[in-house]
Each structure stands twice: as structure tokens, then as C-alpha cells.
Image (cartoon, helix red, strand yellow):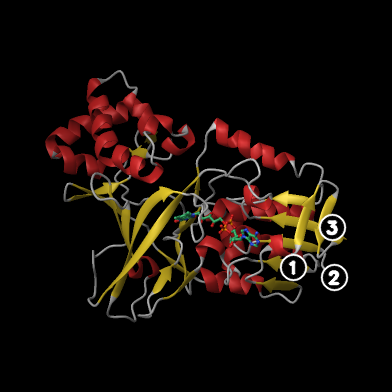
Amino acid sequence: MYDSIIIGSGAAGSTVARKLAEAGEKVLVLEKRPHIGGNCYDRLDAYGILIHEYGPHIFHTNEEDVFRFLSEFTDWHLFGHEVVANVHGELLPIPFNLNTLAKVYGQEQAKELEQILIAEYGAGSRVPIMELKKSAEPKIRAIADYVYENVFLHYTMKQWGQTPEEIDPEVTGRVPVLLSRDNRYFQDKYQGMPKDGYTAMFERMLAHPRITVKTSADCRDCMEFAETGVLLEGTEFTGNVIYTGALDELFGCVYGRLPYRSLDFRLEHFDKESFQGRSVVNYTVSEEFTRITEFKFLTGQQDTDGTTIVREYPFAYTGAKGEIPYYAILNDKNRGLYQKYADRLQSLKNVYLLGRLAEYKYYNIDAIVKKALQLAGTIRR
Ligand SMILES: Cc1cc2nc3c(=O)[nH]c(=O)nc-3n(C[C@H](O)[C@H](O)[C@H](O)COP(=O)(O)OP(=O)(O)OC[C@H]3O[C@@H](n4cnc5c(N)ncnc54)[C@H](O)[C@@H]3O)c2cc1C
């Protein structure tokens, strides 16, 4: 009945589903949650405020093809996303940049430091914090120490439950110092929100006559992945299967669970116009939560008097009911465990692993949409 089965309706699954359907395939999307959109899912809360159920998602990209593709399903509320860190009560622009330098050291001293930094790394560059720490210049190392201690160390330990040395350089490298006065968190050409929200965008993407979406439908209830082939309701399925869920769960975690960090999102509503006057404040030296997001400043929603915020409390994912695996913990041991699971699918040439869970990898939305577009291009019949 179907040419392809796609498991998961997040950014990865929805994109592939749409492209395969446009290419003429009949596509079945199985989604175990009661809604589509994966972790990008957003909805109105009891006060009419658009919230992101699985953590704040800011879209940003330099990829023209990704932006063009998504724009077929949404208009945009575009803005330059800015974040501040609360460091002992003072609000500092992050990533740490030349404006932050002036706030921390004062104009006079900052001028001198700025010249040293620019001479060493070049104006406008993004220098990973770990690189600054290795500099031979004591004044640069002092800046690095400040950033490391006040912006990076405690925040990272909260987020990952590890010391920074234990963390994969791929993750550490994402924390840059910016040698510019650009306060935006991302420097991408396009950044903002789908105007009516992510859920609406993915609903439109999946609204195609050749796509059938089943929600509250766990693939493990109707499919089997054996060495010899994929079974759907006990019958061999020879079409393409694109799996975007967790790979260990597909095999009952027989080799052990793949480690992840999870997050507890605690929402609070206030009957006042604003809580913090901005979208995101990171707590880099204090508090058990990592950040507070005030949704209306992200979404641009103006038709409401009150405001809703969310605090994020990281913890180690155990697989207990209700917990969600968010961030893969990347190291050699975990990659090895992942590979053991991936090997079990090696003989199945019609099964593709795609997305942050199935590939045990961090992807931004644009990166996974790009990957999904590419995959759809290669597997089309
Ligand atoms: C807290 C947080 C904040 C983020 N913020 C940003 C941001 O600001 N900007 C950005 O670009 N990216 C952000 N991301 C990344 C973004 O969430 C991912 O790029 C995106 O969700 C990846 O989509 P996906 O389809 O791979 O995974 P998911 O969105 O997780 O979708 C996978 C889907 O598969 C379903 N599924 C799993 N197993 C089964 C099964 N057995 N049967 C049926 N269905 C199944 C799941 O229910 C889920 O809906 C953030 C991620 C996190 C964790």
C-alpha cells in the first residue's frame, strides 16, 4: 500500500515525507507522540501564549535551499536573536564579544585588550574558548579564564553533568568568543520563528494527498527489524523505511542504553506584561536551571497581557517513563555502543537512519532539514 514508511514526524521525518510524496511516493508516517513536529512542537498554553513544549527553538540558517523549502509552508517572524548571561546579577551579552569585554573590564582596559585580541586572531573572528586558554599571551589567557569561569564552566557542568575536559571538543568548540560588536547569538543570514509556529509549519508540510500520518503510533507495535528484512504487521515490507527515533530503543536496548542528557522544562505564567523584558537569560554562575526563556519575546506574540516563561533543569536521562532523551553525550565509548546498534541494520539496504536520535548526533533544525532533503533526493525511486 505504501512506497515508504517514515518513523517520526519531527523536522527530519516531515521533510523526507514531503519530498518523497512530491516525487510520487505513497508515504506512511508513524509518530509515537500524540502530535506531529517532534521536539519543535509548539502549542498555545492555557493563557493563549504560544509555548515550545520541548524547549525554545530559534530557527537560524545560512542555507538558502533550506530556507526556501521551509518558506513553502510558512511566513516568518525574523529577528536577530540576542542572549544575555546573568553573571552575579549583571547582564552580559553572549557569546562573549567586544561589547561584553567593555562591560567586564571598563572602556579603557577593554580598548587595549581588544587590540591584543584582534592582532592575534583578526577582527570579526570566532575563537573557541579552549583555543584562547592555550594562548601564550597572559592577558588573553586572563580573558579566557574570566570567560571560562563566568560563562562556560558552571553552565557546562550544569548542562552536561561533567567537567569541560570530559566533553567532546565538538561541544566545547561551540562556545566561541566573538571579536566583534555583534550582540546576536547567531550570525546566520536568516533567524527567527515560523510566523504561526512550528506545528503549523509541519502540519502544512505533511498535508499532502500522498501522505498518511498516524499519531500515537509507535512503530515497534507494528514493525519488526530482523536481519532478513523489515516486517509490517507480520508481512515483509520492501519499500524504503526512514527511521528517525532512538536506535537503542528499536532493539529493546539489548546492549544497554545510549547515554543522553535530558531537561525538565518548568513553565510559569505571570499576570503581567513581562518577566525579564527579553527572550533568553542564561544563568552561567548561579541557579540550578540553565536559562529562562520568555516566549512572547521569541515568537513576537503581542495579543496577550500576561507572559509565560520556562526554566530548564538538566539531568541524566535514565529511560524512565516520561523522560525524553535530548542531547547525545558524544564520546568514543558511546559512539561505539551506537555503532553496535547500527550494525544490526547493515544488511537492510532499504532502511535509513536519519535525525538527532537515529544518528546519535546533535543537529540544528536547518542542518537536519538539509540532510533530509539530500536523503530524499538519493532514495527517490
Ligand atoms: C532543548 C533543545 C533546544 C533546541 N533548540 C534549537 C534551536 O534553538 N534551534 C535549532 O535549530 N535547533 C534546536 N534544537 C535541535 C532541534 O530540536 C533538532 O534539530 C530537531 O528536533 C531534530 O529533528 P528530528 O526529526 O531529528 O528529531 P525529533 O524532533 O526528536 O523527532 C523524532 C520523532 O520521532 C518520534 N519517534 C521516536 N521513536 C519512535 C517510534 N518508535 N515510533 C514512532 N515515532 C517515534 C518522536 O516521537 C519524535 O517526534 C534544540 C534541541 C533541543 C533538545
- Front residue of 282/188: it is 282
Q: Mark 1 points at which residue?
A: 28
Q: Quadrant of ligand 1?
A: bottom right
- Return the residue at label 3: 381
User: Which image quadrant is residue 34 in?
Assistant: bottom right
- Residue 103 placed where, x, y %? 17, 44
Q: Tell me the amino acid under the disc marked 2.
A: Met
For mark 2, what is the residue?
1
Residue 219, compared with residue 173, is above or below; it is below
Which of label 1 and label 3 is nearer to you? 1
Q: What element carries label 2?
A: loop
Place of residue 267 in the rendered image (x, y in percent of width and height, measured from the top left):
34, 67
Residue 226: image tag: none
Residue 358 visible (yes or no): no
Task: Inspect the image, locate mark 1, and give the three-letter code of the amino acid beneath it.
Answer: Leu
Q: Mark 1 and mark 2 in contact? Answer it, CB < 8 Å.
A: yes
Residue at (38, 27) in percent of width and height: 131
Q: In this view, does 312 lie to the left or right of 208?
A: left
Q: Position of residue 234 (x, y in %)?
A: 84, 62
